[in-house]
Amino acid sequence: MMLKLTDDDFCRIVKYMKKNYGINLEKKRVLIEGRLSGTAVSHGFGNFKDFFDYVFSDNTGEEAMRLVNKLTTNHTFFLREPDHFEFLKDTVLPYFEKKNAAKHSLDIWCAASSTGQEPYSIAMTANEYFGTAAHNWNIRILATDVDTDVLRTAGEGIYTASMVKDVPPLWLEKYFEAKDETRYIVTDRIKKTVEFRRFNLMDRIPFGRTFDLICCRNVMIYFEQQTKNDLVERFYDVTRDGGYLFIGHAESVGRNTKYTYIKPAVYRKIARPAE
C-alpha cells in the first residue's frame, strides 16, 4: 500500500529536514512518499500525519534517526570524480609531504562519507603515493555522515563485485580480500586509517582538530545558499593554512568565501600576510 502525502504532511516533513539537517526536499514529494510509505505502513499507520506524530514524539530520537536515514541520498562509488584523486596525488599530497615532513602526519576529513567508498579511496590513494614510506606516516581520515545505516556499512568495509568495479585491478588485489564468491572486504591496513563517526553538518564542528584536506562532495547541492555559506565558513575555520577543500563538481561555495578558488571543485585556504 502506497500512502500519499497531504499538503500539510509534505510541508511538515520538508520544514523538519530543512531546519534540522539543511536538506531541501521541496521538489522531492514523490521521493518522500516512496521512501517513507512502506515504513509508515509497517508501523501500522494508514496516513503520514499519524506516522509523523509518532516519529516526532519519540523521546529517544531513534525513530527520527530512522526517518532521516530513509530520506538522505547515499549515491557513491569508489574513485568518484577521478579528477580529485589525480589532484590529490599530483598536488595535495606532495605539498603536505614537504610541509608535514617533521611530524609525518596527515589529517583529512570526509564530511559526507556515505557507505565509505570516498574515505577508503583517499586512503588507498595516499598509500599508493607514499609507497614503502607509508608506514612512517600517521594518515588519519575522519569520515562522518548523518546516516547511521551507511556508517555501519562503511565500518564493515564489505562491498559487492559490482561496487568495486571502478577500483583498479592492482588496488583490488592490494587493498581488498575476497569475503566470498561475490563480495570483497577492505583490508585492515586501509581500515585502520579511517575513523567513522556520526555528524550532522548543521551542527558546530566538535572534533577539536584542524585538517589538511576537507572533502564535502555532492551533498551541498541539496542545501540552500545560506546553509552552504555557513557550512563553508565552518569548514574554513578548521582548515589548516595551505589546506584544501574539495566539493562536488556540480556545486559551488558562494562568491563571498574566504577560500581561494584553485580549479573547478577545488578551493584552498591561503594565509594572508598580516596588515
Image (tube, rainbow, N blue to C red):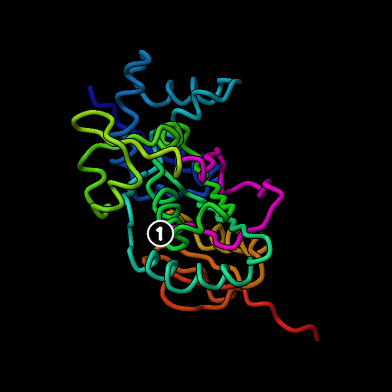
Residue drawn 43% across and 73% down?
A: 90
How many numbered marks appear? 1
Q: Which residues are magenta?
A: 191-218
**Residue with the most extreme right position:** 275
Q: Residue at x 60, y 20 (%)?
A: 59
Report the front residue among 150 and 161.
Answer: 161
Q: How many other residues sit within 10 Å of disc 1, few (<14), some (14-19) or many (≥20)?
A: some
* Residue drawn at (33%, 49%) of the image: 76
Residue 128 appears in view: yes
Residue 2: percent from left, percent from top: 24, 26
| The magenta stretch spans residue 210 | yes
Task: From the image, tell me which residue sits under label 1.
Answer: 128
Would you say 70 lies left or right of 268 here? Answer: left
Q: x, y percentage for residue 157?
A: 38, 36
Image quarter in which the N terminus is found: top left
Magenta-span inclusion, residue 200: yes
User: In percent of the image, x 20 and y 32: which residue is there?
Assistant: 182
User: What type is the residue that disc 1 sits on?
Assistant: Glu
Circle 1 — which element? helix
Depth order, front residue of 190/131: 131
Instruction: Tell me residue 177's x, y (percent).
Output: 31, 37
| 211 displayed left or right of 116 | right
33 or 84, nearer to the observer: 84
Q: Position of residue 25 (x, y in %)?
A: 40, 47
